[in-house]
Structure formats: structure tokens, C-alpha cells
Image (cartoon, rainbow, N blue to C red):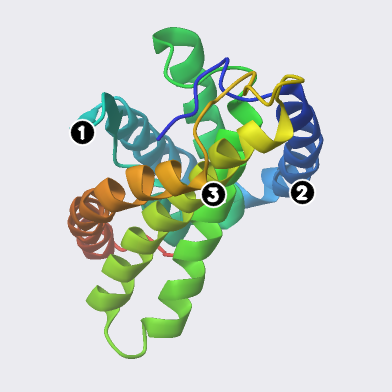
């Protein structure tokens, strides 16, 4: 799901950096009070798991690939602010060390997966947890993948409209919404099922050890 360098126009990633910078500032406020000697090792372990999940690529028809996120797991256990910061770090390391994503695409990837994914997971969990805790966790994880995928697809699909030559030829990502939306969302609907099962497993593991969810 990572957007790589070269796919986004400056008209997209420069404003995105401004939005992401404001979001990172918001998320980092009061960070020292949120972290203690019990939270830090748990957060580090779950961040490392999310990092590993993002490197396991699932082939998708059409010559691309997708992967699980792990952001719902972070958001449900530590809250959306810590999840956003942690996943932004995951994306930065993956782009620098493995070329997954890119520096110009970092703010869009962080906002789509780290921020929107985290908030959608927490929102769904809060709505459904009184009905069924397991259902709430699974639905939160699945929806976090779909919301993130939708955001990525919308940004990519807009590129031919945002940046094109005088003859209308796209200068960056060449495909519009009609191609990108189904290409991203349909495979990730299945990937989201795997994400839901994995997140539910981690959630139950954490609950047995009395980790305090967000």
C-alpha cells in the first residue's frame, strides 16, 4: 500500500508535508507524560511487529503488492496519537532502509495509514465494543486497512488531474480513479481479513497480560 517516490506531484506532497507536520506536532504534545517504563517496552515491541508486517508483501494481480498494516493494533493498545507517531517512524525506516515508500510520499503514507488508519480503528472499536469485543477488534482492524487504502487510492487517482502536461499527459502517476480504486480496495478487502485475525490474536495476547488498551 506504500506510495513510492515519483508517484506524487509536488502539488500533492508539499502541502501534505505541512498537514503531516501539524499532525506530528499534535501527536507529540504531552508525549513525555504518555510514556512510562511500562508503556515504552510494550510500544516498542508492537511497533517492531508493525514494522515487520509492513515488509511482508502479498502479490496483487497487476504487478503490485499489498501488506498488513498493524496500525489498528497500535491504536487499540496505545491510542491514536502514539499509533500515528509509531507508524510514522515505521514508514520512515522502511523507506530509508528498504525502499518501501519514499521520502516525498512519506507524509501522504503517514496520514493515510498512520493517522486515518488509527482513528478509524479506534472509532469503530468504540462503537462496537459493547456489542462484542472480538467483533469490535476485528472490524476495527479491517476498516483501518480499507480506510487507509481508500485514502491512498484517492490521492493516486487524483494525480492525472493535479499534474499533467499541456496535452493532458499525466506527469506522475498515470491512472485515474476508475482504475486505482478497485485495484487497491478489492485486494485489500481480503488483506484486511488477515489483518483482522492477526489483530484479534495480538489483542487477546495483550489482554491476558493485563496490558491496558486505549
**Which class describes the residues within 10 Å of circle 2: few (<14), some (14-19), or many (20+)?**
few
Residue at image position (28%, 34%) is 53
Judging from the image, what secondary structure is the residue with disc 2 in? helix
Locate the N terminus by quadrant.
top left
Seen at 51% across and 42% down, the residue is 152
Check disc 1 and report its element: helix, strand or loop: loop
Residue position for label 3: 151
Q: Residue 61 bears which disc, if any?
A: 1
Residue 172 screen position, x and y as percent: 60, 20
In percent of the image, x 64 and y 18: which residue is there? 171
Label 3 crowd bin: few (<14), some (14–19), many (20+), radius 10 Å? some
Vertical order, 11 against 171 (above or below): below
User: Mark 2 or mark 1: which comes first in sequence?
Assistant: 2
Compared with 4, 28 (above or below) is: below
2 or 3: tag closer to the N-terminus: 2
Q: Position of residue 135 (x, y in %)?
A: 25, 77
Amino acid at each position: 500500500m506504500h506510495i513510492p517516490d515519483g508517484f506524487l506531484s509536488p502539488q500533492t506532497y508539499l502541502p501534505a508535508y505541512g498537514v503531516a507536520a501539524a499532525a506530528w506536532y499534535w501527536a507529540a504534545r504531552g508525549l513525555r507524560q504518555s510514556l512510562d517504563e511500562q508503556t515504552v517496552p510494550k510500544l516498542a515491541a508492537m511497533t517492531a511487529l508493525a514494522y515487520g508486517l509492513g515488509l511482508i508483501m502479498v502479490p496483487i494481480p497487476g504487478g503490485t503488492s499489498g501488506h498488513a498494516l498493524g496500525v489498528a493494533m497500535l491504536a487499540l493498545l496505545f491510542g491514536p496519537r502514539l499509533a500515528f507517531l509509531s507508524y510514522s517512524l515505521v514508514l520512515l525506516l522502511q523507506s530509508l532502509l528498504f525502499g518501501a515508500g519514499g521520502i516525498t510520499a512519506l507524509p501522504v503514507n503517514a496520514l493515510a495509514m498512520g493517522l486515518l488508519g488509527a482513528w478509524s480503528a479506534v472509532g469503530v472499536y468504540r462503537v462496537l465494543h459493547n456489542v462484542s469485543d472480538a467483533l469490535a477488534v476485528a472490524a476495527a482492524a479491517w476498516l483501518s486497512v480499507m480506510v487507509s487504502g481508500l485514502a491512498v487510492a484517492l490521492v493516486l487517482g487524483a494525480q492525472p488531474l493535479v499534474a499533467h502536461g499541456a496535452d493532458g499527459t499525466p506527469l506522475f502517476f498515470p491512472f485515474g480513479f476508475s482504475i486505482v480504486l478497485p485495484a487497491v480496495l478489492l485486494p485489500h478487502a481480503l488483506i484486511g481479513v488477515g489483518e483482522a485475525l492477526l489483530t484479534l490474536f495480538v489483542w487477546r495476547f495483550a489482554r491476558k497480560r493485563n496490558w491496558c488498551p486505549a
